[in-house]
Amino acid sequence: MTSANRNPEIRKDAVNNRTVILSPARSRRPSDFKSKPKPEPEPETNPNPHPNPTCPFCAGNEHQCAPEIFRSPEYSTSDWKVRVIENLYPALSRDVEVKSDDVDYRHADVVSGEVRLGGFGFHDVVIESPVHSVHLPDLAPDGIAGVLLAYKKRIEQLCGIASISYVQVFKNHGASAGASMSHSHSQILALPVIPPTASTRLNSMKEYHNQTGKCVLCNINTKELLIDESNHFISISPFASTFPFETWIVPRYHSSHFHELGEDKAIDLGGLLKLTLQKLSIQLNDPPYNYMIHTSPLQVTSSQLPYAHWYIQIVPQLSTIGGFEMGTGCYINPVVPEDAAKILREVKIPT
Ligand code: AMP
Ligand code: ZN
Ligand code: ZN
């Protein structure tokens, strides 16, 4: 049956307790999904000067950046590979005073329902390469592992700050995915509250565990949804994909926190992340994309550990959301995940 002949289906994501409408009749052929061709760049004498004089993230322009937190390798000079720096325009401030009774939404004004909390937190930028034109999937698996291990190291530092409850690692690539800088980078935001998506996810994983005695992501059905696998990770199209070609990378071993990642597994994950980003780029014409590392809150209890399992969500930005999605929180996805998985399974990487 071609996807256009399939009936629409409503699916529930047991990991996030989200509902999606899969509506293949609204689709072009799934294989026709592509991001719009990019406009031809203006001819330049040197399209990729290095360092790019207008880019603070290029090696050689470190003085244009907000202060560095650390670099890798630790004692490198101009030959650094990854730098973690403060964000020049942070969403939250590390200088806001946290009062002892100010660490939660406990001080809601019960009459008005208004809740106010000091905007304490950390907002960092991870520069993934010293070279302007090198994007994350251009790096070798151990180079990507270097970026992943920089996330890990920074999260471990943030774990030591009592009022930080949750750390979100994310990457915006391309203007319509929210990126304002073209030099390859990602961001780390440490929050004094657990964001609603993380607490909903934890509750949803708990519900599945209560019903089955199992962890939902250890037990994930990969039958027609598997794209690729490595020693320690799988890439899949999630059963209730919210977006066309949404892809998850899930550890095959049970782990609640991303920052438990060791060096060997980081290289293995680097290889699978590279392959996944390359496949999405080839299939979808180098689309803008976001990835998010969905880990557990820092202070989970031991009773929560058996069902809390981290993963990476990669979302190519191929469409914009409309009133239905804003009104219901329920997304319409025209590409059935089984079709997306089959297409991505078959993408060949040129050697
Ligand atoms: P994005 O907007 O996703 O491309 O992320 C780039 C981030 O880099 C933004 O959050 C900016 O605030 C931040 N940023 C821009 N210029 C600098 C700079 N010179 N030093 C540190 N952070 C910067
Ligand atoms: Zn640059
Ligand atoms: Zn698990």
Image: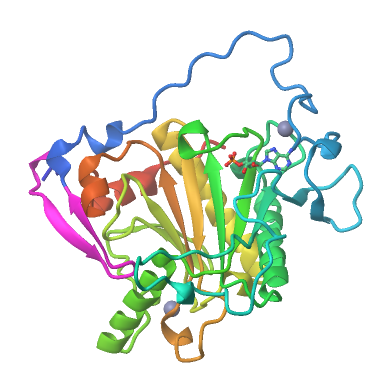
What kind of colouring is applied to the model shown? Answer: rainbow
Residue 135 versus residue 77 in the image, above or below? above
Residue 29 percent coordinates (x, y): 22, 34
For image coordinates 69% across by 17% down, the residue present is 47
For image coordinates 72% across by 66% down, the residue present is 153
Q: Is residue 309 visible?
A: no
Residue 125 versus residue 167 in the image, above or below? above
For image coordinates 68% across by 54% down, the residue present is 147
Would you identify the image quadrant in which residue 343 lies? Answer: top left
Q: Residue furthest front?
A: 111
Magenta highlight on residue 146: no
**Nearest the eye: 349 or 143:** 143
Q: Is residue 172 visible?
A: yes
Magenta highlight on residue 20: yes
Residue 15 percent coordinates (x, y): 34, 69
Residue 63 percent coordinates (x, y): 86, 38
Ligand 2, what quadrant? top right
Residue 271 percent coordinates (x, y): 59, 55
Would you identify the image quadrant in which residue 160 lies? Answer: bottom right
Lateral position of residue 133 relative to residue 314, left or right:
right
Can you say which quadrant of the picture contains the C terminus? top right
Q: Which residues are magenta?
A: 4-22
Image label count: 0
Lateral position of residue 314 relative to residue 51, left or right:
left
Lateral position of residue 190 relative to residue 63, left or right:
left
Can you say which quadrant of the picture contains the N terminus? top left
For image coordinates 69% across by 66% down, the residue present is 97
